[in-house]
Image: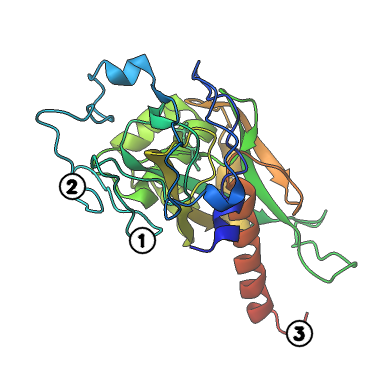
Amino acid sequence: MEAAAMLNLRQNLTPWYPFGGPHRFSPIPMDQVSWDVEWTSYKPPGFTIPAILAGDKEWADEEFGEGFDPQFNWEDAKVNRKSYTGMYKLDKDGYPLNPMGRTGLSGRGSLGRWGPNHAADCVMTRWKLDDKKEVFISPDDNLPKLEFIAIVRLDTGEVALPGGMVDQGEDPVTAAKREFVEEVLGLEYADLWRDSPLNEDMTEVFSNEKIVDRCYVDDRRNTDNAWIETCAVNFHISSKTLQILHKMKFRSGSDAKSACWLDFNSKLKLYASHSLILNKTVTLLYDEWKKENPSK
Ligand code: RP5
């Protein structure tokens, strides 16, 4: 990975680790971010939240020691320890090293897994409609305008895409759908959906699926030895599907305080890497739209 790309993916690392964590080791000069550069006086503080250290969370690993022998850069039926960025390195004691380089903190912070912690994000989009319920074409650039479903996160109060961690054994697309249902439609609806995932309405809402990206996430919780990666999935909905969503109330639940449709704007600042993901989605959708509407 190029140094510039690495540096771009560390914008959200805060000087103090959240959840009562310590101050990250600093400064980390730009030319010493990479693990390829030897730095003998680099001594970051270690931090892992007590709830994870307690060792009873099924979504979390144990501390290194007897009986814990994870296969890094490997995926088994339970845990995916592969990184979307390629093979990551291990340090001399066997700890996985963040592919974006030094973060100023060792341990897992508030993340459960050593190495990549896999998440999934759901980018639910629609073209903006005019008063006649037809796709609105802006006279400025002759293009339709996009809207997407955003949530407000309970923890930071930031606007984000609905998303969360992939459960053990779950595939990322299912996780993106589940997170959408939990965070946008609410936990009660999520229970109904879990019992009948093939329910007609939701099958229609999730019909037009496209993987937008599989990538490292610039999340404030990343450490030297644990980081978030995501699979971002777009569901672009037609006006027929819109009727279905209109029938459903956005009750929001789980990690979301509220959920609503928002107008896309390339300057929107969303949580973690979500602005990047949203911009990528928009590029894909415009390319598709231009192909389908060559005369416009
Ligand atoms: C982001 O945090 C990911 O892109 C995903 O949206 C989310 C996963 O963490 P939780 O929402 O479960 O806290 O890095």
Report the front residue among 145 and 104.
104
Q: In this picture, is 22 found above or below 206?
A: above
The kind of residue tagged 3 is: Ser
The kind of residue tagged 1 is: Gly
| Residue located 69% across and 51% down the image | 147
Q: Which residue is mark 1?
A: 86
Image quadrant containing the C terminus = bottom right
Q: Across the whole image, how many numbered discs are drawn on residues? A: 3
Residue 141 falls in image quadrant: bottom right
Give the distance between the C-alpha atoms of the residues marked 3 and 1, in whole angstroms.
41 Å
For the residue labelled by badge 2, is the local secondary structure a helix, a strand or a loop?
A: loop
Instruction: Say whether marks 1 and 2 touch (CB < 8 Å).
Output: no
Q: Which residue is mark 2?
A: 71
Q: Which residue is mark 3?
A: 295
Residue 107: image x %, image y %?
A: 36, 30
Report the front residue among 110 and 34.
34
Mark 1 vs ligand 1: CB under 8 Å? Answer: no
Report the front residue among 179 and 189.
179
Query: Of marks 1 and 2, which one's residue comes earlier in the chain?
Result: 2
Give the distance between the C-alpha atoms of the residues marked 1 and 2, in whole angstroms.
15 Å
Disc 1 residue crowd, few under 14, some 14–19, many 20+, Cα 10 Å: few
Report the front residue among 78 and 228.
228
Looking at the rendered image, the disc whose residue lies closer to the viewer, 3 or 1, is: 1
